[in-house]
Image: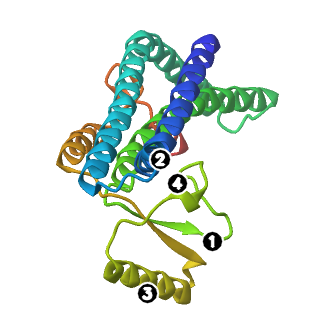
């Protein structure tokens, strides 16, 4: 049984780690795509052609991220299909043993002895095993929820704040930020500076604004479908039982409370 828990923990941790890498890459689609095109075309003065190249690069990078996301979804489904029957047997046997041990403890009445300590240790170990299984499932649910938010905050609107002291945060290009060329009008840039100044006065920290070409309709359409898909949570199940901390709490209440009365 414990080997099943270890395999589940390994695959879940791997999937969560890959999702975190995916989220970081999704946040860099717009900044890195814009910066790469600006460096490759040099001093090209044709604004329309420049914007078309940037939009194509945006879409290309988004397709790569979506492709990785689809692979991760398929991986999670395959792991769940493999582990679900074994987890169901594991949890069912654990619950039966916990009930049997609790019944022995209650049947002792007031004649407590060292066996009570032994039984208590066993119950704690069994609940800990169940907690680890549900905790891994909870991590997968949380990281899948976070993915939808990450896609939404990928700077598709073409605007971002960067910390002055850090230079570049996780949502910007790994290259020098000085190569990023503002593309908004002077009036909008002035408004952006005023907004940044206002945010700093309100305690938002020292930030400066960086502008990119906003994503086009093709990019936004792909992004919309991706967000819609990512809102459907990924989860580990034991047949119909979803492994989460909420269900772990419900199981503990169901198993232990009846024996306290």
Residue closer to the observer: 247 or 143: 143
- Tags 3 and 4 touching, CB below 8 Å: no
Q: Which mark is residue 164?
A: 1
Residue closer to the observer: 13 or 216: 216
Which of pointers 2 and 1 lies earlier in the amino acid sequence? 2
Which of pointers 1 and 3 lies earlier in the amino acid sequence? 1
Quarter of the image where one finds residue 218: top left
Q: CA distance from mark 3 to mark 4?
A: 21 Å
- Tags 4 and 1 touching, CB below 8 Å: no
- Tags 1 and 3 touching, CB below 8 Å: no
Which of pointers 3 and 4 lies earlier in the amino acid sequence? 4
How many marks the image carries: the answer is: 4
Q: Which mark is residue 28?
A: 2
How far across and down, in percent of the image, does residue 73 sit? 37, 25
Residue closer to the observer: 82 or 193: 193
Residue, x 40% and y 43% (percent of image)?
A: 147
Q: Is residue 171 above or below residue 105?
A: below
Q: Secondary structure at mark 1?
A: loop
How has the structure been colored for display? rainbow
Q: CA distance from mark 2 to mark 4?
A: 6 Å
Q: Which mark is residue 188?
A: none
Residue 21 seen from this side: yes
- Tags 2 and 4 touching, CB below 8 Å: yes
Q: Which mark is residue 172?
A: 4
Q: Secondary structure at mark 2?
A: loop
Residue, x 39% and y 33% (percent of image)?
A: 65
Q: CA distance from mark 1 to mark 3?
A: 16 Å
Residue closer to the observer: 84 or 143: 143
- Tags 3 and 2 touching, CB below 8 Å: no
Q: CA distance from mark 2 to mark 1?
A: 18 Å
């Amino acid at each position: 049984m414990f080997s099943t828990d270890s395999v589940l923990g390994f695959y879940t941790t791997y999937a969560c780690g890959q999702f975190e890498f995916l989220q970081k890459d999704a946040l860099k689609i717009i900044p890195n795509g814009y910066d790469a095109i600006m460096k490759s075309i040099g001093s090209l003065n044709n604004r329309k052609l420049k914007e078309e190249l940037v939009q194509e690069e945006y879409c290309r990078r988004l397709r790569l991220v979506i492709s990785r996301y689809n692979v991760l979804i398929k991986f999670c489904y395959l792991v769940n299909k493999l582990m679900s029957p074994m987890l169901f047997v594991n949890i069912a046997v654990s619950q039966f043993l916990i009930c049997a041990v609790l019944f022995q403890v209650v049947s002792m009445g007031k004649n407590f002895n060292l066996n009570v300590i032994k039984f208590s240790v066993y119950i704690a170990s069994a609940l800990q095993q169940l907690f680890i299984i549900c905790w891994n499932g909870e991590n997968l649910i949380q990281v899948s929820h976070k993915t939808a938010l990450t896609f939404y905050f990928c700077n598709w609107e073409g605007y971002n704040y960067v910390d002055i002291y850090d230079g570049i945060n996780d949502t910007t290009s790994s290259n020098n930020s000085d190569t990023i060329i503002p593309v908004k009008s002077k009036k909008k840039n002035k408004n952006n500076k005023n907004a940044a100044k206002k945010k700093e006065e309100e305690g938002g920290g020292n930030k400066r604004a960086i502008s990119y070409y906003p994503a086009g309709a093709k990019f936004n359409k792909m992004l919309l479908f991706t967000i819609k898909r990512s809102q459907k949570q990924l989860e580990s199940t034991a047949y119909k039982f979803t492994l989460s901390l909420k269900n772990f709490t419900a199981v503990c209440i169901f198993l232990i409370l009846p024996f306290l009365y």
